[in-house]
Amino acid sequence: MRVGDTAEYAHPVKLMCAWLDVSKSGYYDWRKRPQSATAARRKELMTLVQKAFDDADGRYGYRRIHAQLAHWGRHCTPELVRALMRQLGLVACQPRPRRSLTVPATAAVDDLVRRDFTAEAPGTKMVGDITYIPTDEGWLYLATVIDCCTKEVIGYAMDDHYKTPLIEAAIRNAARNRTLADGAIFHSDRGSNYMSADYAATLAELGIRRSAGRTGICFDNAMAESFFGTLKNELVSRTTYPTREVARRDITRYIEFWYNRKRLHSTLGYRTPREIWIEHQNKRHAA
């Protein structure tokens, strides 16, 4: 490893050269050589890796940082990014297990999704769920609606309870924020609120078909579960909220300005939900 001019040595240079059987003059000639192109590129990449990690507030692992570098026009292998992160001591935040809020209910609702969380166009298939956020005032509950095409959180609502009005507010916000296709699907678990007659009436009013996975099978609503895992890992587990209002503002900022607009999603080819939405909008206007 090359040592800088201001470094302090544990032993005299002359003695270390003798140990290594190299000449003192050769050592100083090596010191004066210009940095190689490979070393210069590696140094530049390290700077960009650090910037990508900082811009993501420590949320990105090596795969997303590799994708971010590609977005910036800097191409290298994922393994090199991994090695540079290790050298820089950069470790992305890690997920924690999630406790479910589901209270099972029996209702005649079919599974129209069957673990296919893709869609050809925005506003045709959505998934949703409820989670809880700890604050010093007590739990803050978050209900979401996620578009399967763009992976964007198109509707959400927060309150100090997880009763049916909370999920009704989330789906109405989704219908207000995005144009939903006639007969669009909304998929959830079989929690009692999602299976309630009131919620069924709200979906019918909006022209949305109801879908639900099997009781106790988290994989049947994996996309909604995955968002909450990401939210908890990237934001909530790293923060202590004194009030529900502080948590509400922080979560809103995370969804609106980070997750929907800036976060690179592996299922979207390391693009953002907003990029995918704009792409579909452009295609629709060009047709």
Image: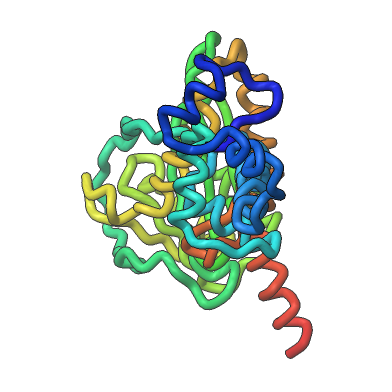
Q: How many marks?
A: 0
Q: Position of residue 180 (x, y in %)?
A: 62, 67
Relative height, residue 222 to residue 276 (above, below): above
- Please name whichever residue, 82 or 113, is drawn nearer the observer in this view of the structure: 82
Residue 172 visible: no
Q: Position of residue 101 (x, y in %)?
A: 34, 33
Residue furthest bottom in the image = 287
- Please name whichever residue, 248 or 177, is drawn nearer the observer in this view of the structure: 248
Residue drawn at 55 percent across, 31 percent down: 235
Residue drawn at 60 percent across, 19 percent down: 244
Q: Position of residue 103 (x, y in %)?
A: 29, 35
Residue drawn at 71 percent across, 82 percent down: 283
- Please name whichever residue, 221 or 172, is drawn nearer the observer in this view of the structure: 221
Quarter residue 70 falls in: bottom right
Residue furthest right in the image = 285
Residue drawn at 61 percent across, 13 percent down: 243
